Amino acid sequence: MLIDFRQAKKLVAQHDSPLMVISKSRIRQNYHTIKKGIPRAEIHYAMKANPHKGILNILREEGSDFDVASYNEIKMLLDIEVDSTNMIYANPVKSIPDLVRAYNVGVEKFVFDNDAELQKMARYAPESDVLLRLAASGDNAYYKLSTKFGAQSKDAIRLLKKAKKLGLDPVGICFNVGCQVTRSDGYIQAIQAAMKVFKEARKNGIELSVLDIGGGFPVRYGHKKTDMGDGFDSKQIIAEVNAAIEEYVPEHVKIIAEPGRFIVGDAAVLIMRVIGISKRKGVIWYYVDDGYYHTFSDMHASGWKFDFIPQSKGRKLRSVLAGPTCDSFDVIAKSIWLPELELGELIMSPNMGAYTSGLSTHFNGFPPAKTVFVD
């Protein structure tokens, strides 16, 4: 864990709970791990994983570029003086107001996967660089993103030719294998498919020069369901993807990667406090000050699993962990074995950096966990 309970108590005494504690050094370490693992890649951090300004500043200082999905994300980056040319608007579907604002502040690279988006970009972001997103197999991904986005390979040349005809500059191909991808197969297949489009495009007078391999590199969480099996090695997956790039992608082609979870997933720990205790049908219920409508928003839709580490030791009893709101859906662990806990006791959840605080709401008047940075 990033901190121990002695440090946790001290931080809660200073900042109250719930509290998200983020390690600056771990973020830097993870960024440089993937940068070193795929040396040809320009790293564009996927802001959706965690858009906290402190994280963005750390990555800006390390030299990262950014993957954005809305004008609000662009605005956050502009506020910390990230140049708009260091952003890729990776959302394949953009509202007209967001598209206009992005173009007006100087964003140059846009992603598309359909005819309607081409028409919008030709009118509201003329002469922009555009990348065609292809659908990719997500068989080894926890979230299969191609169920929502990505053109079929058979439509690629038609869409690239249309982009050029409309006055846009089709510069490359992108794909996203999914989220929490535990094998390299999907990346390798997608790279091979993309390079076939590169060759076919050249035959049609379109010289592509950018390949965006997306994100999805996994984080070890400690639960079989979350990890989709045992034994994956993130660094090995990155190495195998890099080997595929070296084998299939010519040196003159620029590589972009868009990691999010890999950079921030294991860089944070959540500290919660027990605020209530009840016994219901022979089972102990512990109510904590964070829940489904806050840091744990991803758990019910995805079946995502989290670790809960109590301050106390001792014989464990079957327990339930519930959040603070007056909503019966706000239960974060229905059957968990915990020692007997006391009111005010702390519980920590590690690996909470990605898709957690960024999804938090203010439901029922409970604010999201505060964020502090250490080391």
Image: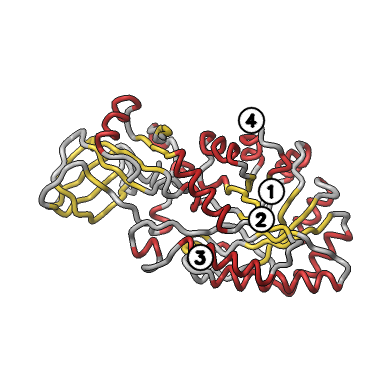
Q: Where is mark 3, residue-wise?
A: 237
> Is there a contact, CB below 8 Å, between mark 1 and mark 2?
yes
* Label drawn at residue 79: 4
How far apart are the alpha carbons under marks 3 and 4? 35 Å
- The amino acid type of the residue labelled 2 equals Ile
Marks 3 & 2, CB-CB < 8 Å contact:
no
Contact between marks 4 and 1 (CB within 8 A): the answer is no
* Dot 1 crowding, Cα within 10 Å, few <14, some 14–19, many 20+: many
- Is residue 192 visible in the rendered image? The answer is yes
Disc 2 or 4, which lies upstream in sequence? 4
Which badge, 1 or 3, comes first in the chain's sequence?
1
Which residue sits furthest top?
A: 14
Dot placed on the residue nearer the N-terminal end, 3 or 2:
3
Give me the disc on residue 88: 1
Q: Residue shown at 68%/45% (left/top)?
A: 87
- Quadrant for residue 222, please give it: bottom left
105 and 5: which one is in front? 5
Spatial CA span between label 3 and label 2: 17 Å
**Amino acid of disc 4:** Asp
